[in-house]
Amino acid sequence: MAIIKISIANWVALWYWNESQKIPEEPRYIRAIRMAFKRPDRWEPWADDRIPMSRFIEYFRMSLEDFRWLSDELREELQLDPLGRGQPLSVEAQVAVGLYRMAHGASYLTIGHVFQIGKETADKTSARFVRAVLKVLRTAAI
């Protein structure tokens, strides 16, 4: 008779335990291992021998020789301080961004995607390029 007499508290505890066994376990989130993000290399068509000349002219509306001449002419004006934050854009990259903007009229967001730079960087670089061209080449015929 003692076995049959189960107190109400024990019965409720057994019922609750049985019900809790029916609840499926929710999946637990496991945090991924943290690792540093390595930026992909910037697109540098002026240093890539695989790009045909016709494609280069299509991108920048000038030949590679003219591109290099323009870069050399603007080098003193566009050279960035390497002690600033981040990696500064090379003179060739700044000329390429400025020429691409003027040649295609693309948005800064598109230019950022093409050259793998931020849209603010594309904006500032384009403005620096135009100012440098006006300052250095305003008396020369292009």
Image (spheres, grey):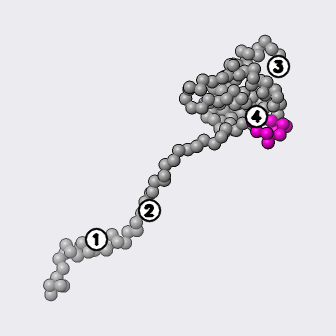
Highlighted magenta segment, given as a residue range: 47-56
Q: Is residue 55 magenta?
A: yes
Q: Mark 4 or mark 2: which is in front?
A: 4
Q: Nearer the viewer, residue 9 or 95?
A: 95
* Residue identified by numbered label 1: 16
Q: Is residue 87 magenta?
A: no
**Measuring 82% from the left and 34% from the top, which residue is drawn there?**
57
Q: Is residue 101 above or below residue 7?
A: above
The type of residue carrying mark 3 is Ile
Percent x, y of residue 78: 67, 22
The type of residue carrying mark 4 is Trp
Q: Quadrant of residue 101?
A: top right
**Measuring 33% from the left and 69% from the top, which residue is drawn there?**
20
Percent x, y of residue 109: 65, 35
Q: Secondary structure at mark 1?
A: helix
**Measuring 18% from the left and 85% from the top, which residue is drawn there?**
4
* C-alpha distance separating marks 3 and 2: 66 Å
Q: Mark 3 or mark 2: which is in front?
A: 3
